[in-house]
Image: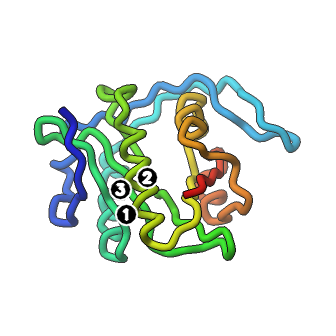
C-alpha cells in the first residue's frame, strides 16, 4: 500500500533514495522544429549519478527552506516517488508556481503514484496563490503522455531560465 506525506528537511539524505530507481529508458522525444512539435528518435538512458543526487538533495532542501512543498510516496517505508513545488509566483497574470520535480521509481511506474503526487502539488499550489503550475518537463514521449493526461498544455509564457538550463525540455503549464 502506498502512503503519501510531506517530506521534512531532516529526512532529505542520500539514504532516503536508497530504494529509489530513477532509470528511464528513452527512445522517442518531442522536439520543436520550425515552430511545430514532432516526435524524433533520440534513444538514451536517463539515470542519476551520485553528483545528481547531491544536487537534487540541495535543491529539495532549498525548496523547503524557502517555504516550498516536497511530498513523497512511500511503500514499506521506502521512498518510491516525490514531487516538489517552489514557493515564488512568477509570470505576471499567469501566476505560475514552478513544479520543480516529479519522479516515480522505475519499479512503481504505471500504478497511479505520479497522478497522486501531481494532484497533491496542484492542491498545494492552489492553496498558495497559484493560478497554474509551470513545468519544465522531460521531452520523452511517455513523460509527455503523463503530463497531457494531467491536463497540461504548452506554456503561454516560457520561463527563460528553464529553457536555458534544459533546452530539450517541453515548457508546460497546468491550470489549477
Query: Looking at the picture, does residue 93 appear above or below residue 39?
Result: below
Of the 4 image quadrants, the one containing the N terminus is top left
Disc marking residue 101: 2
Tell me if 75 is positioned left or right of 91 in this view.
Answer: left
Q: Are marks 3 and 2 in contact (CB under 8 Å)?
A: yes
Q: Quadrant of residue 95?
A: bottom right
Give the distance between the C-alpha atoms of the residues marked 2 and 1, in whole angstroms: 10 Å
Return the x and y of residue 37 as percentages of the image width and height.
Answer: 77, 36
Name above or below for residue 87 compared with residue 167: below
Q: Are marks 3 and 1 in contact (CB under 8 Å)?
A: yes
Q: Circle 3 sits on which residue?
A: 56
Question: Are there few (<14), some (14-19), or many (20+) residues within 10 Å of tag 2?
Answer: some
Residue 107 in the figure: left or right of residue 42: left
> Which quarter of the rendered picture does the C terminus lie within?
bottom right
Q: Nearer the viewer, residue 71 or 57?
A: 71
Q: Residue at x 26, y 38 (%)?
A: 80
**On the rendered structure, is 140 left or right of 86?**
right
Dot 2: what SS?
A: strand
What residue did someone put label 1 on?
Answer: 59
Q: Residues within 10 Å of mark 1 (few under 14, many from 20)?
A: some
Amino acid at each position: 500500500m502506498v502512503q503519501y506525506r510531506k517530506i521534512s528537511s531532516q529526512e532529505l539524505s542520500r539514504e532516503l533514495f536508497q530504494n529509489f530507481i530513477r532509470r528511464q529508458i528513452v527512445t522517442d522525444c518531442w522536439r520543436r522544429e520550425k515552430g511545430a512539435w514532432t516526435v524524433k528518435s533520440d534513444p538514451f538512458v536517463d539515470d542519476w549519478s551520485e553528483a545528481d543526487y547531491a544536487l537534487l538533495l540541495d535543491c529539495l532542501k532549498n525548496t523547503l527552506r524557502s517555504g516550498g512543498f516536497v511530498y513523497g510516496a512511500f511503500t514499506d517505508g521506502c521512498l518510491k516517488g516525490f514531487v516538489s513545488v517552489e514557493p515564488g509566483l512568477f509570470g505576471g497574470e499567469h501566476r505560475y508556481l514552478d513544479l520543480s520535480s516529479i519522479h516515480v521509481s522505475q519499479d512503481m511506474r504505471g500504478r497511479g503514484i505520479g497522478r497522486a503526487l501531481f494532484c497533491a502539488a496542484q492542491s498545494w499550489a492552489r492553496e498558495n496563490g497559484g493560478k497554474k503550475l509551470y513545468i519544465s518537463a522531460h521531452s520523452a514521449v511517455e513523460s509527455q503522455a503523463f503530463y497531457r493526461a494531467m491536463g497540461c498544455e504548452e506554456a503561454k509564457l516560457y520561463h527563460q531560465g528553464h529553457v536555458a538550463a534544459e533546452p530539450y525540455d517541453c515548457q508546460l503549464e497546468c491550470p489549477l
